Amino acid sequence: MGIYDRSYYREDNELDLRPSWNQRSAVSTLIIINVAVFLANVFLSKDFVVGYQGAVNEFLMLRGSDATNPFKWWHTLSYGFCHDAFGFMHLAMNMLGLYFLGRTVEERYGRLEFYRIYLISVVVCGVVWLLKEYAFKSNGSMLGASGAVMCISMLFVFNFPTARVTLFVFPVPAWVLGIILVLTNIVSSPTSSIATDVHLTGVLCAAAYFYFGLSFRFLGDLQGTWRRQWRKITGPKLKIHNVETGAPTSEVDEADRILAKIHESGQDSLSSKEKKFLEKYSRAVRERKEQL
């Protein structure tokens, strides 16, 4: 594969948005989880009446009263994985948007960074909504992935503004889709059941991430650092040398971790320390092989 065959080097109008399924992708995993939660709510609930969303949804959804109960702040994440029990369209529209636009965004940023963007946007949208409910002394409830899906959709628009997407049956540039998404939420009726404030928060999350050049990869670096420090404390102190390269096993493991990170998130995700280690390690391996 040539470098210009990769998705992030293609022109916008060459993006392949045709249906495809990769069971290992973040998009596929998120769709499966959302559908599974929806089905679990249907099968584990006896009756659905006005004001009752089913056993699973009632457990996961976010409520205005949660603002004063820290033990329920985890709802600012869980609400994003349950959908309206009184119709399939709420789930279907969110998952279709995630499927058709999210795959290209995942290719652009990498699987792990896509997870971070999606989950952080769920939490940010939930927190903003909760603060609004608290400020206005309201006690509403919210559920659905709309805010996060809006964030992903707008990241697609920002990254590939001239890509051709099909709106109903009409092909339009992605930037037109972005304008329509924003305007329909701005002019939406105040009495509508659609959480337009959450949608617009998702738009702002995407704009901040894209235009400020944000990255959440440091969270993965922190996790890796914590694991390495824990291994130093609890693991064996001896260094076993690799037979083929002559390098200590700890160095081989670190090199493998960095190479896996490049494969997962791209070379730009590496810190300067990781780049220096990889260069030093590669040079040491070459020198050892020359001595054999």
Image (cartoon, helix red, strand yellow):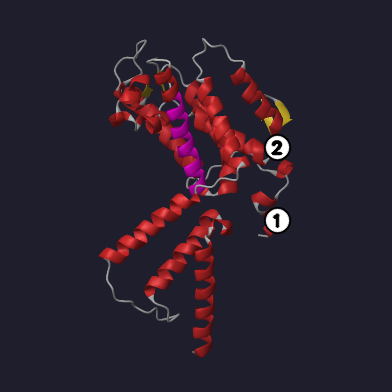
Report whether 47 appears left or right of 176: left
Asked whether, in this view, residue 140 is left or right of residue 113, the answer is left
Q: Which residues are magenta?
A: 112-129
Instruction: Name the residue: 51% across, 29% down.
Output: 147
Instruction: Determine whether 52 is above or below 214 in the image.
Output: above
Nearer-the-camera pick, 171 or 118: 118
Please state if 249 lies on the left or on the right of 235 as rendered.
right
Quarter of the view holding residue 222: bottom left
Q: Would you call the spot at circle 1 few (<14 residues within 10 Å), some (14-19), or many (20 or more)?
A: few
Give the CA separation, mark 1 to mark 2.
Answer: 19 Å
Disc 1 marks a residue whose amino acid type is: Tyr
Can you tell which quarter of the image residue 187 is in? top right
- Please name whichever residue, 26 or 151, is drawn nearer the observer in this view of the structure: 151
Choose between 280 and 104: the one closer to the eye. Answer: 280
Q: Position of residue 47 (x, y in %)?
A: 31, 14
Q: SS at mark 2?
A: loop
- Residue that carries the numbered disc 2 in the rendered image: 161
Q: Residue at x 59, y 34 (%)?
A: 153
Which residue shows up at 45% across the image and 24% down it? 129
Q: Which numbered disc flags the more N-terminal residue, 1 or 2?
A: 1
**Residue type for callout 2:** Pro
Confirm whether residue 100 shows in the render: no
Quarter-of-image position of residue 3: bottom right
Q: Nearer the viewer, mark 1 or mark 2?
A: 2
Tell me where residue 256 appears, x and y as whole percent: 45, 66
Q: Residues within 10 Å of mark 2 (few under 14, many from 20)?
A: some
Labels 1 & 2 near each other (Cβ < 8 A)? no
Q: Position of residue 220 (x, y in %)?
A: 44, 52
Whether residue 37 can be seen here: yes
Residue farthest to the bottom?
Answer: 291
Q: Which residue is mark 1?
A: 4
Look at the image and tell me in which quarter the N terminus lies: bottom right
